[in-house]
Structures are given as C-alpha cells and as structure tokens.
Image: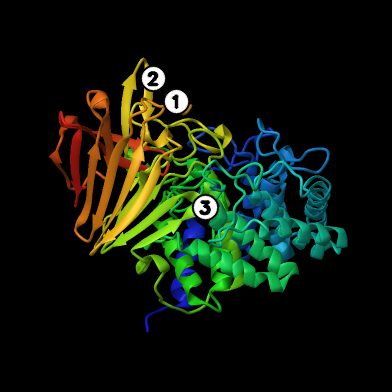
C-alpha cells in the first residue's frame, strides 16, 4: 500500500506556509503612520486588505516552530495594525471602504487560535491586549449574529465556530447556546444530495426550477471546516453530520485536487483550487482523515494544487495568473495560511493513498438541486448546468453550458467561470491588468442584435436531458440565447448536444433558420486543445484570452453554423 508519510505531508504544508508567511512579511508596511504601519500591502490591488490581520495566527505558528523573532515581530505589528479595523462596538470592518462586520467571526477564530496554540510567546501585557480584543469581538458576535442575520449561510457556520471556541475560552454559556442555534440553522439547510445550501438570501429560497443556493467553494473551504470546528469544540455528536456533508462535497473534488465550483451560486469567486476569500479545507479534512483516509487524500491533493499555484510566495487566484502576467492578490495567501497552520497544529500523520470519488465516478450523475449533470468517460470529466439559482447577476453560468471539461493529464480543457466579466464584490476581487483580453471563458451560443448581446448562459429556462448509449453519454440542451436581463433573442429554440466518450467530446448544434446568420458558437478552450470543426466554419483565427475567474488562459474559437444551421465540433 502506498502511503503519504507524515514527513512528506509536513514538508508540503510547512514548506508552503513558510513561503506564504515569508511573502506576507516582505509585503508588510513599515511607515510611521499607524493607519499603514504593520499592514500587508496587496501588489495586485494596491491596498491593504482589511482582513490581513487574520494572518497573526500563521505568523505566530511560524514564530513558535522556527524560534525566528522576525515572525513574532511581524505578528505583533500586524495585530497593532488591526486596530484600524476595530469598531467602537467591538466588530471588525471588512475593509476601510466596507463597513460589513460579519468577518468578525473569522477574525475571532484566528485570534483565538493564535492565543490558544502560541500565546505563550507573548508577554503578559500583550496577551491581555489580545484577549481584550477577542472578548470585544465575542460580544459583537453575540449581540449581532442571530438566526435572522442578513448574511449568507457561511457566516452562520463561522459564527457557530467562533461562539463555541470563545464560549469555551471565556467560560460563557450564552456564547455556547448561540453557537448551537447557529449550527442548527446550518444543519437544517442540507439538501437531499447531502449538500449544504444557503449561499443566497433568503437561505431557503428556491428558483423557478426549484434550485437552491449551493456553492461548493464556500462549502468546502469555509462553511464545513467551521462546522467541524464547532463540533470539535462543543458538540462531538455533530461531527458525524459534518463528516457526511463533507463526504457529499468531496464528490465535487477533481482528481487533481481542485474543487469544481463551476456551478456555484458564488462562482464569481472560484479560483479552481477553491474560493477567493475563503480559508481552505486542509485543517478539517486532515482531522476527518484520521478515521477515513479519503479525507486526508483530498486534503493532500488540494494542498499540492495550492503549492503549484504559488508564485514568489503568493497564492495566485488561478493556475495561469503568473504565466499571463497578472499580479497576485495577497488575500488568497493570508486566508489559506490559517488552514495550513491549523492543520499543522493538529498534527500530521501517515495516510494511505486512496481513490477519490472523482477517480472512478458513475458515468452519469444528476444533481436536481442545481439542475446539473456530471459525466465521466475514460479520462474525461464534464459538468453541464442549467441552474437558475443565482446570488447575483453575472455570478455563474446557466443555459445548459459546459461549465467544466477536464481530462486526465491535461487538466481543465474548459472552465466557464462567470457568465460575463462583471466586477462583483470589488473589495474582494482584483481588476485585470489586461482588460482587453479578460472576458468570460464560458462556451456558449451568442448573438448580437438591436445593439444587444444575447448569450446561452443567460437562459434560465434551458432544459437538459441525458442519455447513455453504449460507452458514450449524450446531454441534449434546448436553449434560447438571452440578454443578461433574461430577454430572449427569439421564440425559436436552439438545440445543442454534447456527446462524451473515452475518445473525447463531440458538440453538435442546430440553429433555427431565422437565427442562422446571427448566432455563433463561442468556444474558449485550453490553448493546446485539439479542436476539430467538421461542420461549420471559423469566423476568425482563435484569440488568446484570459479569465480572472477561475484563472486560465484560453484560445477563443468563434464558429459559425452552416447555412442549414448545423455545426459540429470535436474536442480530442
């Protein structure tokens, strides 16, 4: 049996964390102005992100393990800078220009861990100051985070963890009671497929198709890890429920350790390895992996992917950022450093290498909660979605598009990302350096008419049907290109079929006669992909584009149908 040894796992986690913390210290500001001194400057956004003070925990871990005073000095100065984010009521602002205080939950967990695991490095006076801030954050959470809070479900999970941990730390029964209530809300929002929902408002909102607000990136990297922290601190019986929910989510991990969040209601924050401002999955998965090695396997594969996406000490928002010349936002690094530090504090161990669900999945899997099909044939994995539940316009594709096409040895051939490139959560997403090349990597039918853009991914009424024939699986889509506001191009529907087999993917489109001259099929694929057009024609040579979400360079093909409205494409 092949085993990932504790030494190998420590080398991966500690080596990556060392690089990350080294970059954070390199970017730490040294200026006499207390509004700036000690903060961490983002090279991509040109600002100090308000949540950077959460890195006190991984810096304290490094200080403790290495006995290097530079880490301790950086942690002290970063804590002091964090005073800029503290509000009079004890809450922590998200940013200088964002008054949102829900992030107090994440700050509280980080500061708690710094004190519990490494507080012995502080003087008695310093520890008192840190505990005073932690106490103030606890009071804000207790007074403001309730079952009726206007927040997505991930904040309820984080609040449950924070209140459980702080309840134990300060001996506050009221905190512990609130933790149980917040966790109860989360456990009541689990779909028939075992997936946590509520990444929308209201949490139990259903779309016209009955779809739910499910985001795999947030679930795997934030909500479920926080629920595990809650269970470990306060409710051991709930750990089995967390295990079952994480098991359902693990089926959305790809063989290379990526999370397939191409259908998530917050896919505008998809980074291929996870979610842009979430904390990561390593600590929770390694703890669950002590009794079931499949979780440790998922943690290890994802950690290796994070390592591959790290450049000059910073975790990039996608695999191709560095190759395309995009600067790297520091937000991903200081968030994910916390999960690595907590995994190391929990102790690494020898873990047998096992298969992930995506290594040998069923040929056809359907998730009704998101109206999504996932297909598997030979080396290929494909996700198609017609989900009409959206957290906000532009967040993620619909219309029966291919949201992900993955091949063993090649990785993501197609990764749709956002349905159009719009700036959502501007404090949490960098602007592209090359806006002329940055656009949606969603494969789609598209048309321009009457000065408006119509595209398949905007169609919330598209229908999907799947059928297996021998070793091939075909998904048929009936769709009408629409504007972003949902205005249809025509009453005539277009038909697109996707047939996946071990040899590759065949796409066949049938465009109704009135639309033939207007509609084109846009196909952004990995540049090295073998694309064969057997029916139809290229409107122009493929263009090189880049999509910030989920961070890939693509060759964009524009294919016109034949005069009879048919086009056929092979991807091998």
Q: Quadrant of residue 537?
A: top left
> Closer to the N terminus: mark 2 or mark 3?
3
Residue at 45 percent across and 47 percent down: it is 263
Q: Quadrant of residue 81?
A: top right
- Camera-side residue of 372 and 152: 372
Q: Few, some or many C-alpha atoms within 10 Å of disc 2 (few <14, some 14-19, many ≥20)?
A: few
How far, Cα to Cα, is label 2 from label 3?
31 Å
Residues at discs 2 and 1 in contact (Cβ within 8 Å)? yes
Residue named by callout 2: 452
Residues at discs 1 and 3 in contact (Cβ within 8 Å)? no
Relative placement, left or right, of 555 versus 200 is left
How far, Cα to Cα, is label 1 from label 3?
24 Å
Depth check, mark 2 against mark 3: the one in front is 3
Residue 456 position, x and y percent, is: 37, 34
Q: Secondary structure at mark 1?
A: loop
> Closer to the N terminus: mark 2 or mark 1?
2
Residue named by callout 3: 369
Residue at 70 percent across and 52 percent down: it is 156
Residue at 34 percent across and 54 percent down: it is 466
The residue sitting at the bottom extreme is 1
- Camera-side residue of 38 and 380: 380
Residues at discs 2 and 3 in contact (Cβ within 8 Å)? no
How far, Cα to Cα, is label 2 from label 1?
10 Å
**Residue 14 seen anywhere in this rendered image of the structure:** no
> Closer to the N terminus: mark 1 or mark 3?
3
The residue sitting at the top extreme is 450
Q: Secondary structure at mark 3?
A: helix
Q: Secondary structure at mark 2?
A: strand
**Residue 491 seen anywhere in this rendered image of the structure:** yes
């Amino acid at each position: 049996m092949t085993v990932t040894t504790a030494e190998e796992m420590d080398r991966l986690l500690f080596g990556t964390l060392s690089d990350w913390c080294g970059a954070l210290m390199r970017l730490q500001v040294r200026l006499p102005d207390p509004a700036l001194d000690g903060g961490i400057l983002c090279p991509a956004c040109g600002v100090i992100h308000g949540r950077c003070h959460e890195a006190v925990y991984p810096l304290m871990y490094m200080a403790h393990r290495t006995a290097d005073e530079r880490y301790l000095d950086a942690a002290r100065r970063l804590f002091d800078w964090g005073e800029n984010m503290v509000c009079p009521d004890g809450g922590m602002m998200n940013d200088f220009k964002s008054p949102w205080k829900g992030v107090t939950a994440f700050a509280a967990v980080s500061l708690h861990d710094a004190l519990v695991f490494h507080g012995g490095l502080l003087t008695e006076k310093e520890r008192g100051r840190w505990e005073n801030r932690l106490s103030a954050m606890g009071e804000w959470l207790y007074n403001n985070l309730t079952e009726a809070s206007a927040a997505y479900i991930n904040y309820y999970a984080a609040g449950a963890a924070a209140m459980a941990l702080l309840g134990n730390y300060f001996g506050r029964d009221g905190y512990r009671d609130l933790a149980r209530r917040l966790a109860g809300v989360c456990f009541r929002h689990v779909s028939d497929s075992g997936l946590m929902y509520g990444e929308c408002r209201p949490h139990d909102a259903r779309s016209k198709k009955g779809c739910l607000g499910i985001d795999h990136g947030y679930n795997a990297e934030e909500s479920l890890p926080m629920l595990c922290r809650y269970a470990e601190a306060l409710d051991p019986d709930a750990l089995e429920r967390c295990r079952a929910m994480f098991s359902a989510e693990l089926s959305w991990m790809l063989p290379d350790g990526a999370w397939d969040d191409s259908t998530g209601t917050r896919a505008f924050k998809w980074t291929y390895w996870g979610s842009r401002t979430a904390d990561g999955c390593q600590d929770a998965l390694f703890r669950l992996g002590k009794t079931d090695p499949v979780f440790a396997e998922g943690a290890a594969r994802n950690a290796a992917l994070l390592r591959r996406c790290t450049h000059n000490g910073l975790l990039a928002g996608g695999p191709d950022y560095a190759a395309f010349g995009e600067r790297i936002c520091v937000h991903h690094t200081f968030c994910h450093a916390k999960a690595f530090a907590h995994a190391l504090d929990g102790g690494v161990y020898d873990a047998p290498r096992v298969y992930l669900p995506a290594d040998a999945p069923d040929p056809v899997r359907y998730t009704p909660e998101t109206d999504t099909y996932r297909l598997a044939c030979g080396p290929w994995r494909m996700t198609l979605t017609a989900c009409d539940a959206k957290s906000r316009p532009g967040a993620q594709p619909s219309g029966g598009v291919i949201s992900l096409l993955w091949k063993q040895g090649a990785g993501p051939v197609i990764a749709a990302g956002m349905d159009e490139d719009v700036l959502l959560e501007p404090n949490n997403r960098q602007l592209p350096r090359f806006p002329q090349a940055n656009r949606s990597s969603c494969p789609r039918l598209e048309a321009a008419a009457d000065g408006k853009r119509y595209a398949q991914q905007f169609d919330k009424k598209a229908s999907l049907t799947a059928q297996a024939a021998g070793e091939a699986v075909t998904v048929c889509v009936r769709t009408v290109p629409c504007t972003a506001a949902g205005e249809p191009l025509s009453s005539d529907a277009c038909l697109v079929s996707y047939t996946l087999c071990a040899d590759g993917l065949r796409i066949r489109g049938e465009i109704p006669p009135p639309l033939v001259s207007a509609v084109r099929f846009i196909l952004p694929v990995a540049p090295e992909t073998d694309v064969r057009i057997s029916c139809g024609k290229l409107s122009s040579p493929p263009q090189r584009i880049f999509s910030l979400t989920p961070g890939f360079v693509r060759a964009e093909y524009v294919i016109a149908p034949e005069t009879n409205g048919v086009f056929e494409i092979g991807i091998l």
